[in-house]
Image: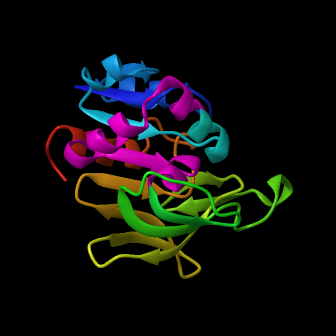
Amino acid sequence: MKIGVLALQGAIKLHQAHLEALGAKYIEVTGEKHLKEIDGLILPGGESSVMLKLVDIVGLGTELKAFAKSKPVWGICAGAILMARSVSCPIQPSYNVIDISIQRNAYGRQLESTEQIIDGYYVSFIRAPRILMVGKNVSVMKNLNNDPIWVESGNLMVTTFHPEINNATPSPWHIHFAKKCKGGS
């Protein structure tokens, strides 16, 4: 199994240990050729507006949307913003691959970033987005203080937190995503 991480900007390398602990081959995706090799794709945390510009520069936008129609994609924090149907605060483009509305940096500035324990595991919320709305075909997998923080729709998965920065390798979320990449749920 080969799982790619969009490697243009953001928290890229931290996923390598999680994926390799699962026996997956870790691939840094920087162009269209890499999308043809992988069974699933992680859109990492980082700065969503910068990622959008870089994806545009390398010409991957259309290919990412097409990939998400047929293979598993997991958007983490900024990656979740890229996947959303609509983005606010400020309004910015996205790839509209999952029916959610999301607010950027909803919990404040960098200083308000926090760690939380989710299902017994530490995860980081770093200038995290807030999911404001989920469509009828989107399942809320986990809430925190009444806010969805993990949602799924078919082969698509979104977390507003960073599970790659946690006390377990592989994280439960990497395990779950790898099952999606193998054809499970």
Residue 83 visible here = yes
Magenta segment main secondary structure: helix
Name the one closer to the observer, 71 or 149. Answer: 71
Which residue reaches farthest bottom?
146
Question: Residue 39 in magenta?
Answer: no
Residue 47 visible here = no
Figure quadrant of residue 20 = top left
- In the picture, the quarter occupied by the N terminus is top left
Q: Is residue 45 found left or right of 159 in the rendered image?
A: right
Which residue reaches farthest left?
183
Which residue is drawn at the image coordinates 42% and 20% (left, top)? 31
- In this rendering, the answer to whether 87 lies above or below 29 is below
Question: Residue 71 in magenta?
Answer: yes
Residue 19 rendering spot, x and y as whole percentages: 38, 29
Which residue is drawn at the image coordinates 27% and 41% (left, top)? 66
Q: Is residue 180 found left or right of 96 in the rendered image?
A: left
Which residue is drawn at the image coordinates 46% and 24% (left, top)? 16
Q: Which residues are magenta?
A: 54-83
Residue 94 rendering spot, x and y as whole percentages: 50, 53
Residue 81 rendering spot, x and y as whole percentages: 54, 55
Q: How many marks?
A: 0
Name the one closer to the observer, 70 or 171. Answer: 70
- In this rendering, the answer to whether 169 lies above or below 21 is below
- In this picture the colour scheme is rainbow
Figure quadrant of residue 72 = top left
Residue 115 rendering spot, x and y as whole percentages: 68, 56
